[in-house]
Amino acid sequence: MKHYDLVIVGGSVGCLVAAVQSARTGKRVKLFLPERGVGSGFGARPFKGRRLDIGTRVFDLNAPPKSSSPASSLDKYRGNEDFRLFMPHIRAFVEELLQGAVEDLPPAQLSYGGKLVPEFLASLDLSSLPQLLNQHQIAQVREETAEILVHELNGTPVLGRSSELNFAGLGYQLLSLANHGKSFHDLFIAPYSAKIYPENWQEVPADLRHKIWSPIFYPKTLNQACDGRLERGRETLTFSTVRDGDFGVFVDRLMTRIEAAPDIELDRFSKFLGLAPEAGGHSLSFEGQEIPARVSGQLVLGLSVADIVALNGHSAEIDMLSLGVAWAEVSESDINSAASYVTVHDPDNPAYRLSFGGSGAPSGKRIANVELSCRVPREDYETAVRFALEQSGILREGAAIEMLDGIAGVRIPAPTQRNRLSLEQAKQRLSDNGVEADYIGTARDMSRDILNQHILQGLALAT
């Protein structure tokens, strides 16, 4: 049995960061890397001399901490803290890896009724709401939120008044209605969420709402926004990307470091089948491998919910979420918006998010990334892409569009209570069988599965 300081199984960003940073500190690392899916969607998709971002890909490196005293040391990270407390560490790692080739992007925007306003899903700044609604709609939202501030709906917690908020125990639709009222919910929350997860978005646990990129607003803030009298403003969120727009370079640089590091021993696998304790270590079984790998050292698993649940021959029904993404090339002169990305709330628009990224487009052209509802069939992508870009207001009507590629029915584990329970049961089963492992990414905590948390978890494991 061969000993390492760290034994990592998985190809998520967190796994790659943990391997790179551990090797830099002199640790010996064994990395079992899947043959496909390295970078978990943050890598680039090659297509006819171009590199396509798989949807909207940005860094969140500028968000100020909620605390005036951010944590100074990674050894204070325990896994459930706000990543903003450790932002200097995240930013330093990204900038060093990319050799400073990080640039800030223009603010994000939101499209509704053909109007483009500052995006408020991520910033939670509702100042632009009155620009999107007519007087009747404004009056309805004002009246409903005023009522919420006086009476709770069926005892559901109201933000800003309830002292204890158990988001994990509440469905997203219930909490949204209780805090937003029916009008705002029906206008902005329901149609947007239904594009991303039409089968069951209503029952997504409220603490997993970020997995369908949807927010919860304080009813007081929403009420004040209707009159343009918000008591507190928020700084505009500034996202960043890799200079020249190819986000996949981030994953490429991680892999280059891994392949060049003498202290990282790399093996690739097609499917991880089993895991069992052995004296002083663990044995790991992979498809197509007759003899299990026997290794010792700190074990880290960075796998999907489905992969963790399926270990050692177990099975459970996994709720899946389908995604669609398409790419088109357009002329820079036809683009009306330079936003880092645009969220699309119109129910008749098949897209939920639009952005520009990737590399390899001819001079004067840009690659549009169009994230589409899974309800759009692949044969309708060209029509859907044109309608999405024009109706949202980010592309001139009648502009030339060259369709590049599209993927329909990309299936990933959905953010549901059943999946979370299946994951926790699988982890407990491994523990009961004597497997001692740390987890990273989705496998660690479905509520903290975002890029910054992946990077932070990887850095902390290497500390």
Image: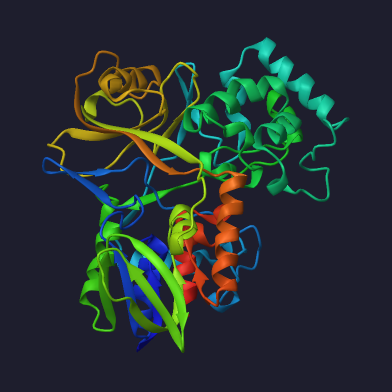
Picture quarter containing residue 424? Answer: bottom right
- Residue at 43% x, 60% y is 303
What residue occupies the far right of the structure in this picture?
150
* Rendered position, 450 above or below 108: below
- Residue 52: x percent and y percent? 24, 42
In depth, the one of 279 and 162 nearer the eye is 279
User: Does residue 213 appear left or right of residue 367 in this picture?
Assistant: right
The image position of residue 68, as x and y in percent, is 65, 64
Q: Is residue 132 visible?
A: yes
Question: Which residue lies at the image location 59% right of the left edge and 42% below the top edge?
Answer: 209
Query: Percent x, y for residue 463?
Result: 48, 80
Quadrant where the image shows the N terminus: bottom left
Q: In front: 81, or 335?
A: 81
In terms of image quadrants, where is residue 154?
top right
Tell me what residue is drawn at x 36 percent, y 53 percent: 40
Q: Is residue 93 visible?
A: no
Q: Position of residue 189 (x, y in %)?
A: 59, 28
Report whether 182 appears left or right of 243: right
In this rendering, would 336 be left or right of 62?
A: left
